Image (cartoon, rainbow, N blue to C red):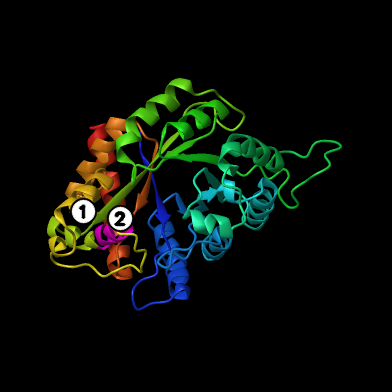
Amino acid sequence: MMVAISILELVRVREGHTSREALDAARDFAVEAEALGYGRIWVAEHHNMPGIASAATSLVIQHIAAATRTIRVGAGGIMLPNHAPLVIAEQFGTLATLFPGRIDLGLGRAPGTDQLTLRALRRDMRSAESFPQDVIELQALLGPVEHGQRVQAVPGGGTEVPLWILGSSLFGAQLAAQLGLPYAFASHFAPAALLPALQVYKERFRPSEQLSRPHVMIGVNIVAADTDAAARRLATTQQMSIVDMFRGERGLSKPPIDDIDTYWSPSERAQVQGFLARSIVGSPATVAQGIAALVEETGAEELMIICDVFDPVARRRSIALIAEAARAGDLARIA
């Protein structure tokens, strides 16, 4: 089995740069990913984070899709409790009408923000409790329009945009299995729950009109460079970002540093290493081994790669090396 590779685009705002530059960099990065053979590029809904410019997720998807031709573009994901299902059906129905056959819709239950911002979004704190019903409602709005249907998504009805359930716990695994939908697990920030969640999903999966058998995508942080040492240095950008998050500071993306131990305390180091336990960082050979081992362990059909590198040139180089490493990992597993 050949593993498919895709990109989760964080739309990072870098120190010394603007949100507009981040949006355009995401667009240009997608063009590069398409040329390298990546299957999808997704963006995620985050609010009130100065360092991430993807709050208006459907607009960012449009910006990327308009600049590309073949790569699938989607949400990884839309935090459905923040929205009425009809609004999301209209947005993604419009995207699917503009870019037929290229739009994905991943759905998450978390708010994607803090509680204060959740109130600013005018959402009920209890709205996450209706997530399963909202997914079903959204699926119906994107499905064929029934005779006499009083409420339609226009555009949207009949587009049948593929839905994915995103998760970082057993809840999403159970729901994806029950609805017969593909499942994307966020092991890039919830590594401990990865294997239990996949087991639940595969054991309880029920075939549906969209999907006849379980389909798993795993989110994984990967940074590649010509040497292990160079990759570890590039990876300090993400490590600092996670430290800042634990400190309650959500700033802009920082350039890499030579010695990460000057940035974090011993306790913070332990926290970050746990958070990033499934990361793969190194040379092409190291990355190929890591990918092969991860796919062998999990049986995942796809990897959704988070390549959080500060410099755009180094980031493009990294995803090129990752694409090569993924092919090498496939060959190693087949052999």
257 and 163: which is toward the camera: 257
Q: State which quadrant residue 320 falls in.
A: bottom left
Q: Where is residue 132 in the image (x, y as percent from the top left)?
A: 59, 34
Q: Identify the image quadrant of the C terminus.
A: top left
Viewer-side residue, 49 vs 114: 114
Q: Is residue 293 above or below residue 88?
A: above
Looking at the image, residue 269 lies above or below residue 172: below
In the rendered image, the residue lying farthest to the top is: 203
Q: Can residue 35 be seen in this view?
A: yes
User: Which numbered dot is residue 268?
Assistant: 1
In the rendered structure, the answer to whether residue 289 lies left or right of residue 164 reads left
Question: How many C-alpha atoms fall within 10 Å of the one at disc 2: few (<14), some, or many (≥20)?
Answer: few
The quarter of the picture where the N terminus appears is: top left
The residue singled out by tag 2 in the image is 246
In the image, is residue 108 above or below residue 9?
Answer: above
Q: Quadrant of residue 212?
A: top right
* Residue farthest bottom in this picture: 16
Q: Where is residue 279 in the image (x, y as percent from the top left)?
A: 26, 47
Cα gap from disc 1 to disc 2, whole angstroms:
8 Å
Residue contact between numbered discs 1 and 2, judged by CB atoms under 8 Å: yes
Find numbered disc 1 in the image and state the secondary structure of the residue it sits on.
Answer: helix
Q: Residue at x 28, y 32 (%)?
A: 296
State the image coordinates of residue 213 (x, y, percent, origin top left).
49, 26
* Location of residue 84 with respect to 55 vertically, above or below: above
Q: Is the magenta stretch mostly helix, strand or loop?
A: helix
Q: Is residue 243 magenta?
A: yes
Residue 229 appears left or right of 309: left
Where are the magenta residues, as a range? 237-245
Q: Position of residue 187 (x, y in %)?
A: 34, 42
For the residue marked with disc 2, what is the amino acid?
Answer: Phe
